[in-house]
């Protein structure tokens, strides 16, 4: 019972600001209790700071995912505008050469934007050896001209972003001679 009184007296003393205690001589227990309270306060502050940091980084990560393509999209919007203009012009004109030149210019502009962003087409030619790292075989057809395991035709172009394949080239491969 006496220990309980001593503890409550110490706790009461802990609630007294350190400035008021400064003039008095503190016992080792009182010093340890003050230090404990200081550490508890520091821990609570650091814990709150860490929680705020965690929430902030989660929000920043979500924003990066949600708006990460904004820069590229802004660069691609003029391409969409040019296509819209070309389609309107094609409806009003019967000049296929002019339309073709316009579409070729838009295509060149789009390729330049992608190259500036580090996106490049994967070069694939008929007769080239099939490479599973960059090609995806859609069909396997017999061919007397092209040896087995080589590409007969490119169906859809593949692309890399920096060094990573982001879309494999879709190809038809040779099954060798039909014999």
Image: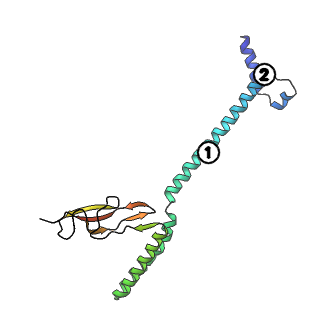
Q: Which residue is at a point 74% across and 25% down the rendered structure image?
A: 33
Where, quadrant-wise, is the N terminus in this rendering?
top right
Q: Mark 2 points at which residue?
A: 28
Color style of the picture: rainbow
Q: Which of marks 2 and 1 is nearer the N terminus?
A: 2
Nearer to us of marks 2 and 1 is 2
What secondary structure is marked by label 1? helix
Q: Where is residue 96 in the image (x, y as percent from the top left)?
A: 34, 86
* Above or below: residue 122 compared with residue 13: below
Which residue is located at x 36 percent, y 69 percent? 123
Instruction: Decide: is 95 above or below 123.
Output: below
Q: Which of 31 and 93 is in front in this view?
A: 31
Where residue 156 appears, as percent x and y from the top left, is: 31, 67
| Dot 2 alpha-carbon crowd within 10 angstroms: few under 14, some 14 to 19, many 20 or more | few
Q: In which quarter of the image is residue 34?
A: top right
Left or right: where 109 falls relative to 28:
left
Task: Classify residue 111 as left or right of residue 153.
Answer: right
Question: Disc 2 on helix, strand or loop?
Answer: helix
Identify the residue position indicated by label 1 in the image. Answer: 52
Q: In which quarter of the image is the C terminus?
A: bottom left
């Amino acid at each position: 019972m006496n220990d309980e009184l001593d503890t409550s007296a110490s706790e009461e003393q802990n609630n007294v600001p350190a400035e008021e205690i400064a003039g008095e001589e503190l016992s080792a227990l009182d010093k340890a209790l003050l230090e404990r309270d200081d550490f508890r306060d520091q821990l609570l502050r650091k814990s709150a700071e860490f929680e705020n940091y965690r929430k902030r980084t989660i929000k920043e990560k979500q924003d990066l995912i949600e708006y990460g393509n904004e820069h590229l999209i802004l660069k691609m919007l003029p391409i969409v505008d040019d296509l819209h203009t070309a389609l309107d012009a094609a409806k009003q004109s019967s000049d296929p050469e002019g339309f073709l030149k316009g579409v070729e210019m838009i295509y060149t502009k789009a390729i330049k934007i992608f190259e500036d962003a580090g996106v490049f087409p994967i070069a694939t030619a008929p007769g080239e050896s099939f490479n599973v790292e960059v090609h995806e075989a859609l069909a396997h057809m017999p061919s007397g001209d092209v040896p087995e395991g080589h590409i007969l035709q490119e169906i859809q172009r593949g692309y890399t972003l920096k060094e990573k394949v982001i879309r494999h080239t879709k190809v038809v491969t040779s099954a060798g001679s039909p014999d």
